[in-house]
Image: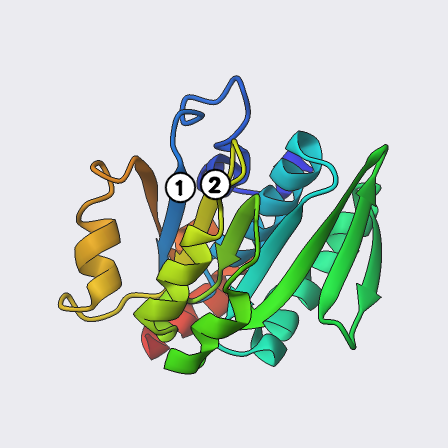
Amino acid sequence: MTASFSKKQLRAMTWWMPKSRDKGFDALVCDGAVRSGKTLAMGLGFFLWAMSCFSGRRFALCGKTRGGVRRNVVEELLPWLRRLGMTVSDHRAAQVLTVRFGRQENEFYLFGGKDEGSAALIQGMTLAGVFLDEVVLMPRSFVEQACARCSVEGSRLWFSCNPEGPQHWFYQEWILQAEKRNCLHLQFTMQDNPSLSKTVRRRYERLY
């Protein structure tokens, strides 16, 4: 499996492991180019961490909309999770995944943070971790409420984003203050995604 990933992808996937040089961080932010492979690496790492370290806990997968997080994260990850030996039950009506891995079982709730009222959707939950995909597209109130829900011992925060203006609140308060927040910040480029052919990579580089 390691041959399929770059060194940076593997670092984003394994930063939480006991032997990792990054194990002391409380959060991970991965930003950078489109098609750089950061979402796949982070998503796999998030599920491996959750299923290795917890059982009987709740986690949140967040995007701008529930449909978006399902398309961009869940559908991309499901084949990989099953290949790793996880059993995934998708309860679409309740917008929750029940995942089993050996004797461990956890629930992963899908949330959309599209506007200021979205914070109420996640309020009151107790979470062991949250993964916010494209966090710069979500309102600050939702992001802060999601982070505040992570009160379980050992909980961690996972953020992915594409570049945004330097005045954006997330850039100012998380990326620029990563050290203060005990956050690992990794910047990705298309070179960090070995699944892209040279031809496709050159096309994306011309476009973006």
Quarter of the image holding residue 25? top left
Residue 113 in sight in this render: no
Say left or right for 180 vs 21: left
Say left or right for 184 vs 39: left
Earlier residue among tags 1 and 2: 1
Residue 158 in sight in this render: yes
Residue 107 drawn above or below residue 63: above
Q: Residue furthest top?
A: 19
Circle 1 sits in a helix, a strand or a loop, which is it? strand
Residue 84 drawn above or below residue 153: below
Q: Can you tell which mark lies on residue 174?
A: none
Say left or right for 144 vs 15: left
Which residue type does callout 1 highlight?
Ala
Residue 23 location, x and y as percent? 45, 25
Disc 1 target residue = 27
- Residue at image coords 48%, 52%: 149
Disc 2 target residue = 156
Q: CA distance from mark 1 to mark 2?
A: 6 Å
Quadrant containing the N terminus in the rendered view: top right
10 Å crowding of disc 1: few (<14), some (14-19), many (20+) = many
- Residue at image coords 42%, 53%: 147
Residue 122 location, x and y as percent? 53, 66
Quadrant containing the C terminus in the rendered view: bottom left
Marks counted in the figure total 2
Residue in front for this viewpoint, 189 or 196: 189
Quarter of the image holding residue 90? bottom right
Residue 55 drawn above or below residue 177: above
Residue 86 drawn above or below residue 164: above
Which residue type does callout 2 highlight?
Arg
Q: Confirm or deny contact between disc 1 and disc 2 (CB under 8 A).
A: yes
Circle 2 sits in a helix, a strand or a loop, which is it? strand
